[in-house]
Image (tube, grey):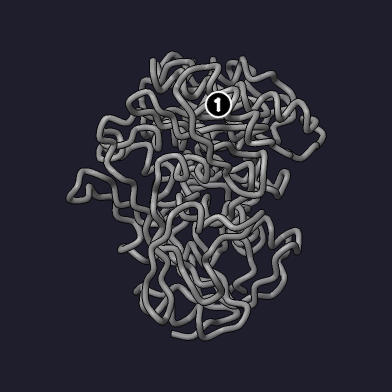
Amino acid sequence: MLLAPVEYARPSSLDEAVRLLGAYDGARALAGGQTLTNVMKARAAAPDVLVDLNDLAELRAISRSGDGGLELGAMVTLSELIRSPEVGEARPILAGVASQIADVQVRNRGTIGGNICSNDPTNHLPPVVAALGATMTIRGEDGERTIGAEEFFLGVYMTAVQPGELLTRIAIPPAEGERDAFASVPIGKDGTCIVNAAATVRDGQARIALGCVAAVPLLVTSAAEEAAVRQAVQDAQLDPPSDVHASADYRRHLAAVVAVRAVQEATA
Amino acid sequence: MEPVAGQRISVEVNGERQERDVEVRRLLVHFLRDDLDLTGTHVGCDTGNCGACTVIVDGMAVKSCMMLAVQADGSSVQTIEGLAPDDELHALQQAFSSFHALQCGYCTPGMLMSAKHLLDHNPEPTEGEIRRAIQGNICRCTGYVNIVEAISAAAKGEVK
């Protein structure tokens, strides 16, 4: 399909990318393009300027932080997450979940930053970074700020990244005895999720982020036992959407099911 | 650097350097099909689901309907036309023929490029790995069984 006319720049430094995003109204960052290109085809987004982040090597780095956690550049692709020895050692859930997203071709282009910045409620990674207690670093012309998932995810397709700003880095804290797992009910193998949940468990306590049931990942905590998890999900008084794949009631039922499965897998 | 609405791009396609002026809004698949007349790369769904437009960019399989032509500037692209020399068949193409791994053929170029990407990275795939590798390529004719057998046979060199 022919896209609407749009302008393009592929800066070679982060400073230049941030300057371009700030200098042009209607400028938008282009990461892997696996969502944005299609949204532009459908005329659901009409950016005037695309600032392509693909030449920014500084956003492609994966490293272990001093405390044993992970520092992930926003432009790390899903395929790179899957192959990364650092991710495999520090927080293998990221690789495991990335391998469930779409297909090889999409994973070769799609990025961790794009997945969380698009914040489609059915995306896989927003609940994962929420459950892991990740922090996101956002850069604008006035400097950087680092915030947690509760502040980062604001609504359907909306995050704290404002016009003129860029998500640069996702920092994952060290596991320190935490064990993580992800469970979902997708439409077909590795398809779009009807409901998903990421859980992190330590010392019998679970932190669970539910996806697909609200505009943003919904965080609940409970003891890591089935009855307690079910009660915690019930207490969250979910008001999920209904669609052709699942009614609100069924989605609410599945939310408890995937929460329990994720916690059980994390404690197995 | 300031944004532009179009630019001259230089892309190595199937080993040959190609230079063209393109609008930013031109998708890679249209650059290949309409500017270079490489119509073997098909447009199926144009929404990133079907995989008919799969090509290999700098060694990675991508769906060329979800990449701008300007993004391929400076890259190396391989399409179905570059899989084997003229009048010859690549082992995968021969296997698809021998195993009846196509009927209408619309998905076949993309399926072959995904299969090539798999074998380039994993020369001895299991059946499960083959199935995962073609997850992003939809075939509405075959039911996939013959495609999986063809890729497996090509990997093992068991194609006549």
Q: Which of A228 and B143 is in front in this view?
A: A228
- The one nearer the camera, B54 or A79, is A79
User: Residue A244: horizontal and vertical position, in percent?
Assistant: 82, 34
Q: For the point 61% across and 21% down, which residue is it? A: A257
Dot 1, how many residues are within 10 Å of its Cα: few (below 14), some (14-19), or many (20+)? many
* Residue A193 to residue A140: above or below: above
Query: On screen, A207 above or below B159?
Result: below
Quadrant where the N terminus of chain A is found in the figure? bottom right
In-front residue for pair A211/B128: A211
Q: Is mark 1 on a helix, strand or loop?
A: helix
Report whether B45 appears left or right of B146. right
**Is A239 left, or right, of B82 in this rendering?**
right
Q: Position of residue A172 (x, y in %)?
A: 34, 47
| Residue beneath the point at 54% across and 71% down | A162
The C terminus of chain A lies in quadrant: top left
Determine if residue B144 is in view. Answer: yes
Q: Quadrant of residue A238?
A: top right
Percent coordinates x, y for residue A133 in the rendering = 40, 45
In x, y percent, where is residue A178? 32, 31
Using the image, determine if residue B38 lies above or below residue B126: below
Q: Is residue B88 visible?
A: no
Residue at 51%, 72% in the rendered image = A51
Which residue is outermost to the left? A66
Q: Mark 1 points at which residue?
A: A259
